[in-house]
Amino acid sequence: MAFDPKHMQMAIDLALESIQNNGGPFAAVIVRNGRIVGRGHNTVTSSFDPTAHAEVNAIRDACNHLQAFQLSDCEIYTSCEPCPMCLGAIYWARPKAIYYGCSKQDAANAGFDDQFIYDELDIAPAERKIPSTQHMQDQALSIFQTWTNKEDKTEY
């Protein structure tokens, strides 16, 4: 596992291509054993999907290509430090490394400021800008009991 500048350049080039095609200025490639197995760029506005960030799209592409739901033997090259949502998705995918070009401060300077989300995570759920309250926990716990008892489940 070592950084390869050609893969970062591919992510940068894909981000520039995305801008030229009315996409957002972000892109990512996923590499396994030196070979690209997934790629994605920001399609939030073109797909009307707030989750269609570059890293999420690249993870979906790689997982589909590899027919796997984890990328433990892969590396992610992304044109910018991942936002909170993408970082969460990356951790769920479990790659062995993340390499990024621009920092989150660089993104903020360009008008993509996610600091408010980082700040919200430190606030009690009911006090957040979008309040969150828990209801019917006892009934909902039956879901996890059913999962726990299921003998033929696929762990993840």
Image (cartoon, rainbow, N blue to C red):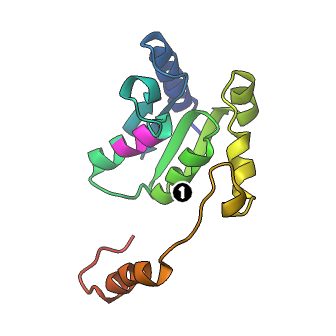
Local secondary structure at mark 1: helix
**In the picture, residue 123 is in which quadrant?**
bottom right
Q: Residue at the location (32% across, 89% down)? A: 149
**Residue 116 image offset from top left, x and y in percent:** 72, 42
For label 1, the residue is 91
**Residue 138 image offset from top left, x and y in percent:** 46, 84
- Name the outermost residue toward the top: 20
Amino acid carrying label 1: it is Tyr
Residue 75 position (above or below residue 126):
above
Residue 156 position (above or below residue 73):
below
> From the image, which quarter does the C terminus lie in?
bottom left
* Highlighted range, magenta: 56-60
Residue 124 position (above or below residue 47):
below
Residue 111 position (above or below residue 117):
above
* Residue 63 is one of the magenta-drawn residues: no
Q: Is residue 126 visible from the viewing direction of this image?
A: yes
**Residue 30 image offset from top left, x and y in percent:** 44, 41
Q: Which one is in front, 82 or 149?
A: 149
Q: Is residue 2 visible from the viewing direction of this image?
A: no
- Left or right: where 75 falls relative to 149: right
Q: Which one is in front, 151 or 67?
A: 151
**Residue 2 image offset from top left, x and y in percent:** 59, 45
- Left or right: where 58 falls relative to 89: left
Q: Residue at the location (67% across, 62% down)? A: 126
**In the picture, residue 44 is in which quadrant?**
top left
**Main secondary structure along the magenta-highlighted residues:** helix
Q: Residue at the location (55% across, 22% down)? A: 25
Crowding at mark 1 (Cα within 10 Å: few <14, some 14-19, many 20+): some
